[in-house]
Amino acid sequence: MSGSNKTDFTNPSVFILQGIPGLEAAHVWIAIPFCAMYAIALLGNITILLVVKKEPSLHVPMYYFLCVLAITDLVLSTFILPKMMAIFWFNSTVIDFNACLTQLYVFHSFSVMESGIFVAMALDRYVAICHPLRHSAILTNPMVSKVCLAVVLRGGVLILPYPFLLRQWSYCRTNIIPQPYCAHMAVVKLACGDTSVSSYYGLFVLFCVMGLDVIFIVVSYTQILRAIFSLPTKDARLKTFGTCISHFCSILVFYIPGLFFSLSYRFHQTVPQHFYVLITNVYYLMPPMLNPIIYGVRTKEIRNRLLHLFIHKGP
């Protein structure tokens, strides 16, 4: 077996996912909170989808975008967690080369899609607060569909070079990935020769896609805050800002840790590897788990509908 892990090969048939290096003895216990987070993510996001579907008053752009965000979170967590649980509980560390490329493609493309959805939600809040009388005329259902399609196509097309480039490299060092899922830079670091094209393209996606998304969101919220502070009363300001707070919290959860972890993986980090891998895995599960909680608690319409479903006693 060791010979298959560290031999001279140019087209590996499998990769070995190591889990959390250095904490193998604790994998069974580490899996329990991860499994709980996944269960909460599934329950929360499916609940959001069902509530929006059943409540006609929620059939507006803000909640359509929220549904796309919930679907994105479901796909992201589902493509990572089941295999992670198999590693932690059953020591199923082998993953087919093509399956690994598929996993990393879905993982990164849906991460880009999630970033795009946050931009779309920022656009919705900007139009609703800064141009309230034109909101229904600008963000019509056909326009919302086009925005969602653009978000999906952008994520799918921009990440498409990742697996194609990875297929071109020779893997002559090892096929062991020191984490429980396949990610772009984790596979690139296993390749021999000059892999700068993959690394530079990854940085391009990071800065020119998510970086531009952050800039657009910051500009949007700058205009939103200016509009809010121009309102005549404190109650009006608080009420209007309350419509943005859920989106703002989700943005902070998604972007700030994500940017730090993505950059630290490319450059030297002083933290122990097992701590870094553990924390990054927690981070990637946080948005799918927290987004439905944030929106369920902070959004009055969803909260009221949930309360109605649980306490309503039919005839």
Image: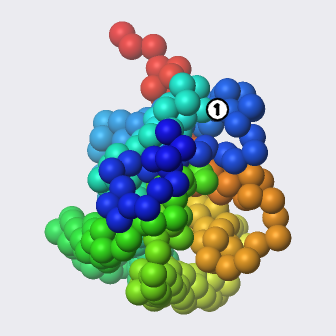
- Res. 74 visible in picture: no
Residue at x-position 59% and y-position 51%: 179
Q: Amino acid at mark 1?
A: Ala
Relative to 243, say whether 120 is above or below. below
Q: Considering depth in this image, is 173 or 279 the residue closer to the camera?
A: 173
**Is residue 214 shown left or right of residue 166?**
right
**Is residue 28 shown left or right of residue 220?**
right
> How far across and how far down the image is residue 119, in percent?
44, 75
Residue at x-position 46% and y-position 71%: 191
> How far across and how far down the image is residue 70, in percent?
42, 49
Relative to 315, say whether 243 is above or below. below
> How far across and how far down the image is residue 109, in percent?
36, 65
- Res. 165 visible in picture: yes
> How far across and how far down the image is residue 288, in percent?
52, 49
Residue at the far top: name it. 315
Point out the image quarter for the C terminus.
top left
Callout 1 crowding tier (Cα within 10 Å): few <14, some 14–19, many ≥20: some
Q: Considering depth in this image, is 220 or 228 the residue closer to the camera?
A: 220
Q: Secondary structure at mark 1?
A: helix
Residue at x-position 52% and y-position 20%: 311
Q: What residue is pinned by disc 1?
A: 31
**Is residue 175 shown left or right of residue 166?**
right
Residue at x-position 17% and y-position 68%: 142
- Picture mark count: 1
Q: Considering depth in this image, is 290 or 29 the residue closer to the camera?
A: 29
User: According to the image, what is the colour scheme of the structure?
Assistant: rainbow
Residue at the far left: name it. 142
Q: Considering depth in this image, is 222 or 263 the residue closer to the camera?
A: 263
